[in-house]
Amino acid sequence: MTTVTVALSSGSYPIHIAAGLLADADLWSRLLAGRQAFVLSDDNVAARWLPRLQQGLAGADAPTLILPPGEEQKSLGQFAAVIDALVQHKRRRNSVLIALGGGVIGDLGGFAAACYQRGIACIQVPTTLLAMVDSSVGGKTAINHPASKNLIGAFHQPEAVIADLATLATLPQREFRSGLAEIIKYGLIADADFLLWLEQQLDALLAHDAEALAHAIARSCAHKAAIVARDPTEQGERALLNLGHTFAHAIETELGYGAWLHGEAVAAGLVLAAELAAELGTLPDRTLAQRTRHWLQRAALPVGLPAGIDHEALLRHMALDKKNLGSTLRFILPTAVGRSAIVDGIETGPVRRVLGR
């Protein structure tokens, strides 16, 4: 088992990475320490992996709520349903919510845990590649609003993250490739050597090579853990983790939640961010946009906007982005291979030109 530690001033928590962790009764006994639990999952994940988790939780007081799958579940209505279930099962303040699923279940479950009785413990059990390397780590929890993705949320760090690599074996290929966008993002943000490794190992990752996957997940988590430790509530540096996301969230909101997977929108957003950086002159290496496009195309991910999407609508969604500090836009942009920066005060003109290409 590989363990990455997220070390915060308020305390640390582990990210455990290995195959077979769901059914590890000793691990779950240590994590729960006799406390009540509550499992949140969705139909697709529960059908495949809930029995394995229940094997690990044998003897624990752990009722389950299973929701339909899909991004549209990150809603006020389903948030209320989770709270109602916690009340129905008389979960106490020292209970542990276990979020078994992808980013949707992790975000919804984490937000419910943050709010129920002013905060109960949460253990994230990501079952998608994207959730393993991104949404399960760092304590960002949220639900969507029709006006903007993740508009309603809270910071609520998990007690632990359990990444069972066995769950990736049944992940649809489209969702697996979606997770690769977030892995490539870490290289673009802060790790040129990791980008080189990804170029060399991308075929192995696409073939689900266990050693390559474990390395990519651990390295991605280590990058996120280090940034979160320095900036747990996104007052500065942590915003770098949103490279490509201003474009991505606008695309997801305009298309309707779930039309594109999050990683697919991030892939297009990474290319658009590199093109915007070149347009603004903050990226001397103008080939980086083309190289980013090439890496993502190898992973069969989108590298441009959906056909016919309304550019002005995208700009309206970007205006509501949580990173903005005033009337102008804030973007995370690459400045070199393996480096990025927070850029404030961007007017809509350059963004329109990039969207129109």
Image (cartoon, rainbow, N blue to C red):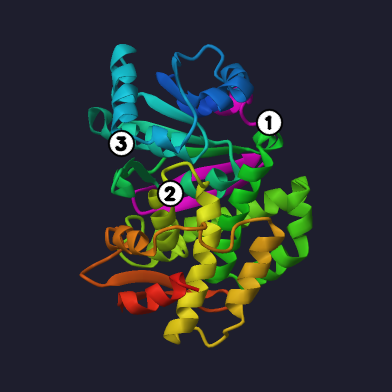
Which numbered marker is on residue 208? none
Earlier residue among tags 3 and 1 = 1
Labels 1 and 2: the sequence-earlier one: 1
Does 328 lie within the magenta span?
A: no
Answer with the quarter of the image where residue 304 lies: bottom right
Which image quadrant for residue 167? top right
Q: Which residue is mark 1?
A: 20
Q: Position of residue 266 (x, y in %)?
A: 51, 57
Binning the other alpha carbons within 10 Å of mark 3 as few (below 14), some (14 to 19) or many (20 upward) gives many
User: How many angstroms separate mark 3 from mark 1 (CA)?
Assistant: 28 Å
How much space separates mark 3 and mark 2, taking CA atoms?
Answer: 29 Å
Residue type at mark 1? Gly
Residue 91 visible: no
Residue 114: assigned label:
3
Q: Residues within 10 Å of mark 1 (few under 14, many from 20)?
A: some
Q: Is residue 344 left or right of residue 269?
A: left
Q: 32 or 188: nearer the eye?
A: 188
As helix, strand or loop, the secondary structure at mark 2 comes to helix
In the image, what residue type sits under mark 2? Leu
Q: Nearer the viewer, residue 306 or 341?
A: 306
Residue range in magenta is: 1-27
Left or right: 137 as drawn, with respect to 8? right
Front-most of residues 178 and 134: 178
| Callout in the foreground (3, 2) | 2
Q: Where's residue 206, x and y in %?
A: 74, 51
Q: Residue at x 57, y 85 (%)?
A: 285
Instruction: Determine the secondary structure under disc 3.
Output: helix
Instruction: Please report the residue visible at 61 percent of the width from the left and 28 percent of the height from the top.
Output: 22
Kindly identify the amino acid type of the residue bearing the numbered disc 3.
Ala
Labels 1, 2: front one: 2
Q: Residue furthest front?
A: 308
